[in-house]
Image (cartoon, rainbow, N blue to C red):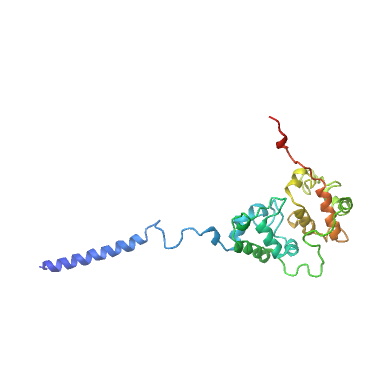
Amino acid sequence: MRSAPHRLAVFGTLMLSAACIATIGCSRIHGRPGPGPEVIRPDEVLDFPTLYKENCAACHGANGKNGSAISLANPVYLAIAGEQTIQQTAAKGVPGGLMPAFAKSSGGSLTDRQVSIIAQGLLQQWGTPDLLAGANPPPYSATLSPNADHGQQAYTAACARCHGADGEGSTGDLKTGAGKLGSIVNPSYLALISNQDLRSITIAGRPDEGMPDWRSVTTQPLTDQQITDIVAWLASKRIAEPGQPYHSYQP
């Protein structure tokens, strides 16, 4: 028969083992917080796919195209704009348009590093190095004095065959709807798009919608002056108060 001290020693060993097992088990209890953060801080998200999906895809499309805003999966647009302009646009937004500022310094929610990652990621994902080498493309921003009357003439020669004589669009095939284009002089459309976006689309096209860039519309590429004038003519179609002029409402 075992002695009392021996039984006490065995009992103590069992209790110590049970305590160790319980301690290890408790540290692995489902739902118990781990040593690190459960959810990554928003300003610590540094991968391009996540940043693009959470901040850009809603307007520019999940794959950079077929969105309500300009296509970013357009190598011509990326080549004309360049990384610095894209980064500045993402940071500060586009005055006169729907593109908001995303940098914290401009009231947004992204750090400067995150904005830079988006700009670099766009070029790496959808850009083509040296795409326009030797092509002499028009500059991203307008620098010449515009002439709306000349713009109408350039529009008629280069754009009317698709967008209609006065920009009213095209009904396309009445049965299938193929080739249908909306009005580009609609007051609501012009109220929502900036002159810079009009210029960017005229230069870079919308390949996701079958619209060619500045080189493909006629036998001769559109010049910088012609593009500047076309944008001026379109802008002249804006009205001061598109939609309901609520401020003049009298109860």
Image quadrant in which the C terminus is located:
top right
Instruction: Residue at 73%, 56% (x, y): give it.
Output: 208
- Figure quadrant of residue 56: bottom right
> From what the image shows, is residue 170 above or below residue 62?
above
Residue 45 relative to residue 209: left or right: left
Residue farthest to the top, as pictured:
251
Which of these two is toward me, 20 or 247?
247
Which of these two is toward me, 192 or 214?
192
> From what the image shows, is residue 50 above or below residue 149?
below
> From what the image shows, is residue 119 above or below residue 169?
below
Query: At which x and y percent is residue 69?
Result: 70, 52
Which of these two is toward me, 79 or 44?
44
Query: At which x and y percent is residue 57?
Result: 64, 55
Residue 13 relative to residue 188: left or right: left
Query: At which x and y percent is residue 166?
Result: 85, 46
Query: At which x and y percent is residue 164?
Result: 84, 47
Residue 111 relative to residue 194: left or right: left
